[in-house]
Amino acid sequence: MSGSEYKFISYSQAYTNPKEAVQKSKEYLQFMDERRSVRDFRNEDIPRELIENLIKTASTAPSGAHKQPWTFVAVSDPVLKRKIREAAEKEEKEFYESRATKEWLEDLAPIGTDWEKPFLEVAPWLIVVFKKSYNMEEGKRTKNYYVQESVGLACGFLISAIHNAGLITLTHTPSPMNFLTNILERPDNEKPFLLLPIGYPSKDAKVPDLSRKGLEEVSVFLEGGNSKKE
């Protein structure tokens, strides 16, 4: 990169030896394995500063050409939450009653979901994530790259940050989601990607008794001949 016109700065990170790294990875696995999609929220306020920190954490995610093609719209206004719930339930009712295939509904049955979404009003905050297919700078359209992948990564960071803060969420994707663009008055270059209600679990919150796939079901290891194996 010698002679580059762009500035680079030194990067450093505290060294963790392999044994310590394995232990840290086990602890983080245990912590993240406790994360669940929860639909039963407590109607208890959480400070705006917390939501701001969650969004800033999500924005540390990598993105194509560092374009950061996302907008996080945080909603606590009860009037807007009511509008979002009504519009979402309209789409969800149509999905469950006419659009979803029999197979799809059978796959959803163990989760216990239906078209009613009270959590959209009960949760103290909603974060609606929009993907920016392009930018508008001084009236000129500029391109973004790997938008879907970039926004997906940011959402993963956001969900992890929510869990780390001791809060709950679930990924809600009513389809189509154009009503979110209209209700939240977003510009044409932004399209809704994901809706995340955020708050504390209610005292009687329940989640489905489900298990995650084992390592052997989700991974393939291709190790060289000199790799150490247990």
Image (cartoon, rainbow, N blue to C red):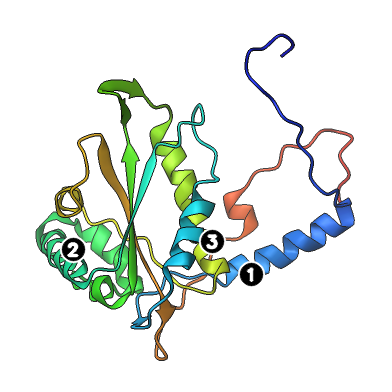
Total numbered labels: 3
Q: Which of marks 2 and 3 is nearer the N terminus?
A: 2
Mark 1 sits on what residue? 31
Query: Which residue lies at the image location 69% right of the left edge and 25% below the top edge?
Result: 8
Neighbour tally class for label 3: few under 14, some 14-19, many 20 plus, Cα within 10 Å: some
Q: Which of marks 2 and 1 is nearer the N terminus?
A: 1
Which secondary structure lies at badge 2?
Answer: helix
Observer able to see residue 100: yes
Residue 1 in percent (x, y) is at 71, 14
Query: Which residue lies at the image location 72% right of the left edge and 37% below the top edge?
Result: 222
Q: Is residue 44 above or below residue 30?
A: below
Residue type at mark 2: give it. Answer: Ile
Q: Is residue 25 above or below residue 125?
A: above
Mark 3 sits on what residue? 161
222 vs 183, left or right, is right
Neighbour tally class for label 1: few under 14, some 14-19, many 20 plus, Cα within 10 Å: few
106 vs 176, left or right, is right
Instruction: State the image quarter where residue 197 is shown.
Output: bottom left
- Tag on residue 91? none
Residue 126 in percent (x, y) is at 32, 64
Instruction: State the image quarter where residue 2 is shown.
Output: top right
217 vs 140, left or right, is right
Residue type at mark 1: give it. Answer: Phe
Residue 61 in percent (x, y) is at 54, 44
Is disc 2 in contact with disc 1, using a CB cutoff of under 8 Å?
no
